[in-house]
Image (cartoon, grey):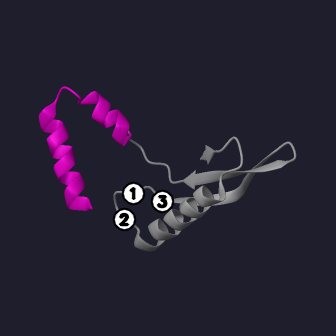
Amino acid sequence: MKCFTRALHPDLQARYTEISKHLAATRLPYAVGFTFQPQGIRVRSEWLPILKMEWIHGDSLVKHIEQNLRNPAALINLATRWIEMV
């Protein structure tokens, strides 16, 4: 779960909502599904948005890249696989 510490700009709320709908409809095997909840958690008297995501075991994309910065073959392999998926 990702909790936002303040209300989001309406454009960002709309973007998260549309991405959430798209991922739910397409069920891409390489994307983590999530739902955007504009009133996800109440802190004191204020409702704040959350992203509720699937739990996935493993390294994040950023961590994998950071761990392989000196391994060009691994990064080329990652880039090739990424292009094939999208």
Residue at image x 55%, y 59%?
Answer: 16
Q: Residue furthest left?
A: 73
Q: Which residue is mark 3?
A: 33
**What amino acid is labelled 1 in the image?**
Ala
> Which mark sits nearer the N-terminus, 3 or 2?
2
Q: Are marks 1 and 3 in contact (CB under 8 Å)?
A: yes
Give coordinates of residue 46: x percent, y percent: 82, 48
Q: Are marks 2 and 1 in contact (CB under 8 Å)?
A: yes
Q: Is 67 displayed left or right of 44 in the figure?
A: left
Q: Which residue is mark 2?
A: 28
**What amino acid is labelled 3 in the image?**
Gly
What secondary structure is the magenta-colored segment mainly?
helix
What crowding class fits label 2: few (fewer than 14 Cα within 10 Å), some (14-19), or many (20 or more)?
few
Q: Residue furthest bottom?
A: 25
Residue at image x 46%, y 73%?
Answer: 25
Q: Residue furthest top?
A: 70
Q: Which residue is mark 1?
A: 31
Q: Magenta stretch: give its range.
A: 60-86
Give coordinates of residue 23: x percent, y percent: 45, 66
Distance from disc 2 to disc 1, alpha carbons, whole Å, reads 6 Å
Residue at image x 25%, y 60%?
Answer: 85
